[in-house]
Amino acid sequence: ASPARDRLRIAIQKSGRLAEPARSLLAACGLSWRQSRDKLFCYGESLPVDLLLVRDDDIPGLIADGVCDLGIVGRNELDEQAAERRRNGMPDAYQSLRGLGFGQCRLMLAVPEEWEWRGVEQLAGLRIATSYPAILADWLERQGVDAQVVELSGSVEIAPRLGTADLICDLVSSGATLAANQLKPVETLLESEAVLAGAVREPNDMRAGLLAMLLKRVDGVLHQRD
Ligand code: PRT
Ligand code: ZN
């Protein structure tokens, strides 16, 4: 267990799609910070709630290790790291506390445009490029299909053209990137959005009250936005 603390620490993306909306949401909850935007740590002024600005990939781990109490991260990233932990026999470390209504996208299978899609049985023996190997492997197991997962950290959508995979499993929002790469979406593995994530075990010191208050304010802001 981490030592008792009397300030909450929230990890958000430093730059990228979720950075600005995450900050705006927390500001709308009445939080303000002393440091300027380009710093990695922002000291909470209006309330003892500090920010850590990091890469989104690091957020689940920071919560699992107790470095941060909360994080704002895509459900896709949280689920991938949770699935990876489970596949490695590790206990669950974090949970999604609230869906935040921004950063919506889908994790989808996409195939070359000229393919005729007849269903998941068609995937048997094929190679699927993805940055979400654990979610994809779980999904393939549930579908009962034996396909090969090819893990790529970026530029997944060009893998079929390069011949390193037959199809891909990637995030889609407008679909423009798929179309530009002559791919078409055929199956949805996950509906994603930004979530407020926390540890499975809730704090039992000063932070418990702060967490409850923050959740109430988040609910208020989300309700207003509906
Ligand atoms: O630097 P850091 O590691 O923090 O950032 P990152 O580059 O890993 O993440 P970032 O900022 O790209 O995305 C952060 C989160 O935004 C993701 O984890 C998702 O939860 C969410 N999100 C929402 C998206 C998209 N929409 C999205 N469209 N993440 C990625 N994309 C990609 C998509 O895969 C495609 O390549 O953006 C491209 C454009 O998409 P289309 O369909 O509109 O063409
Ligand atoms: Zn990232």
Image (tube, rainbow, N blue to C red):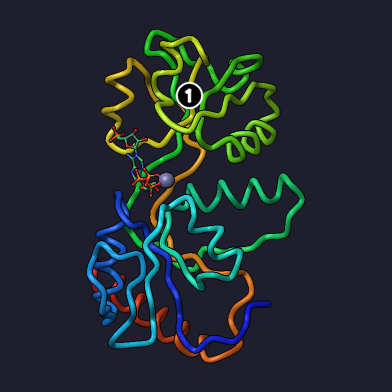
Label 1 Cα crowd, 10 Å radius (few <14 / some 14-19 / many 20+): many
Q: Amino acid at mark 1?
A: Ile
What residue appears at the point 70 percent right and 50 percent down from the top-left corner?
Answer: 86
Q: Is residue 174 above or below residue 94?
A: above
**Numbered disc total:** 1
Which residue is at the far front? 39
Mark 1, ligand 1, within 8 Å: the answer is no
Task: Indicate the position of residue 8 as horizontal and vertical percent values.
Answer: 45, 80
What residue appears at the point 51 percent right and 14 percent down from the top-left corner?
Answer: 164
Task: Indicate the position of residue 98 as horizontal and vertical percent values.
Answer: 44, 67
What secondary structure is found at the residue carrying circle 1? strand
Could you say which quadrant of the image residue 34 lies in? Answer: bottom left
Camera-nearest residue between 13 and 28 = 13
Tell me the quadrant of the picture where the C terminus can be found: bottom left
Quarter of image, ligand 2: top left
Task: Indicate the position of residue 190 as horizontal and vertical percent values.
Answer: 49, 43
Task: Indicate the position of residue 176 as horizontal and vertical percent values.
Answer: 26, 28
What residue appears at the point 50 percent right and 70 percent down from the top-left corner?
Answer: 68
Q: Which residue is mark 1?
A: 168
